[in-house]
Image (cartoon, rainbow, N blue to C red):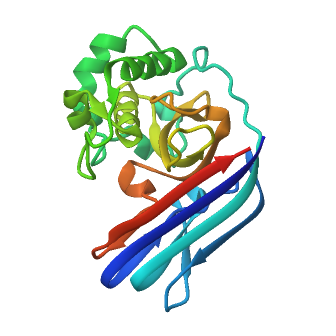
């Protein structure tokens, strides 16, 4: 599948601010880069740094006043989307060193708070069957509702409120998985067929020796996801972190085949 990605950000900055952008899609084995370009307004040279786990990169910008960032990319996505149900969980003692931290609670994925619930609801299942059951539960019991959460909302808040957006679905999915002993990390992505178009948050779980994509919201097909960044929770995958104040003027995302 050949996907064209377009993203435009326009913010107003009342005073000088440092900005960390993560809007460039990440070339990987299953999403091959054809061509891309990032254009950013600002008075100083850009500085790039690697993303977590070697996935993608982030870009430092220093700006003031009207700030624009524009990204265009074309990727060929070739992803095997095999059913998860038969995939086994990797024993903890056999996990690669870089995967182990994704077993632990994080600021927005308080997996230690879900241990009893996950054992009671899904303890009879293992591996991919458990992951699929948790995703179904989330999709059935949490309503997609814009405005139901904010940048401080964690998995426990969403579980109680039973409402949220893709970021919240992903937090609950990751927290459930970690509580079940399955490593899970958040993924920011461009998503084909997402309506309305926007940056999307999903989860990867470590099953049968590799990372597997799961979209607990069910809003976009996994075969049309293009990864941007990965991390423990939304803190690590934010498409734009502003060290200062800013006002959104316009933001557009488009993914077409």
Q: Quadrant of the N terminus?
A: top right
| Residue 34, image x, y percentages | 80, 59
| Residue 53, image x, y percentages | 55, 55
Give the residue at the far top of this rendering. 124
Task: Specify whether 241 is left or right of 79.
Answer: left
Task: Specify whether 150 is left or right of 96.
Answer: left
Q: Nearer the viewer, residue 55 or 63?
A: 63
How many numbered discs? 0
Q: Residue at x 27, y 74 (%)?
A: 245
Q: Residue at x 47, y 22 (%)?
A: 131
Q: Nearer the viewer, residue 257 or 74?
A: 257
| Residue 148, image x, y percentages | 25, 39
In the figure, 74 relative to 87: above or below? below
| Residue 239, image x, y percentages | 46, 60
Task: Specify whether 201 is left or right of 257.
Answer: left
Quarter of the view holding residue 27: bottom right
Q: Residue at x 49, y 45 (%)?
A: 200
For residue 108, say whether it is visible. Answer: yes
In the figure, 206 relative to 240: above or below? above
Q: Nearer the viewer, residue 150 or 135?
A: 150
Quarter of the view holding residue 66: bottom left
Give the residue at the far bottom of this rendering. 43
For residue 28, say whether it is visible. Answer: no
Q: Residue at x 55, y 89 (%)?
A: 45
């Amino acid at each position: 599948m050949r996907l064209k990605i377009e993203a435009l950000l326009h913010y107003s900055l009342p005073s000088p601010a440092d900005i960390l952008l993560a809007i460039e899609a990440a070339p990987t084995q299953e999403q091959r880069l054809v061509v891309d370009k990032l254009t950013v307004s600002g008075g100083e040279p850009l500085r790039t740094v690697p993303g977590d786990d070697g996935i993608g990169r982030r870009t430092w910008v220093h700006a003031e006043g009207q700030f624009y960032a524009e990204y265009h990319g074309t990727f060929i996505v070739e992803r095997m989307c095999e059913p998860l149900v038969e995939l086994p969980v990797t024993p903890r003692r056999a996990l690669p060193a870089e995967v182990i931290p994704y077993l632990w609670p994080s600021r927005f994925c308080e997996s230690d708070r879900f241990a009893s619930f996950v054992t009671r609801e899904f303890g009879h299942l293992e591996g991919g069957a458990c992951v699929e059951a948790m995703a179904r539960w989330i999709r059935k019991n949490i309503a997609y509702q814009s405005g139901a959460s904010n940048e401080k909302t964690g998995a426990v808040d969403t579980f109680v409120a039973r409402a949220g957006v893709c970021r919240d679905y992903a937090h609950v999915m990751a927290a459930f998985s970690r509580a079940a002993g399955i490593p899970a990390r958040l993924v920011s992505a461009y998503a084909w067929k997402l309506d309305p178009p926007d940056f999307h948050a999903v989860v990867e779980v470590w099953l049968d020796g590799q990372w597997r994509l799961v979209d607990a919201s069910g809003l976009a097909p996994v075969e049309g996801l293009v990864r941007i960044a990965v991390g423990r929770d939304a803190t690590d995958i934010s498409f734009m972190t502003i060290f200062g104040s800013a006002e959104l003027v316009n933001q557009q995302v488009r993914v077409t085949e």
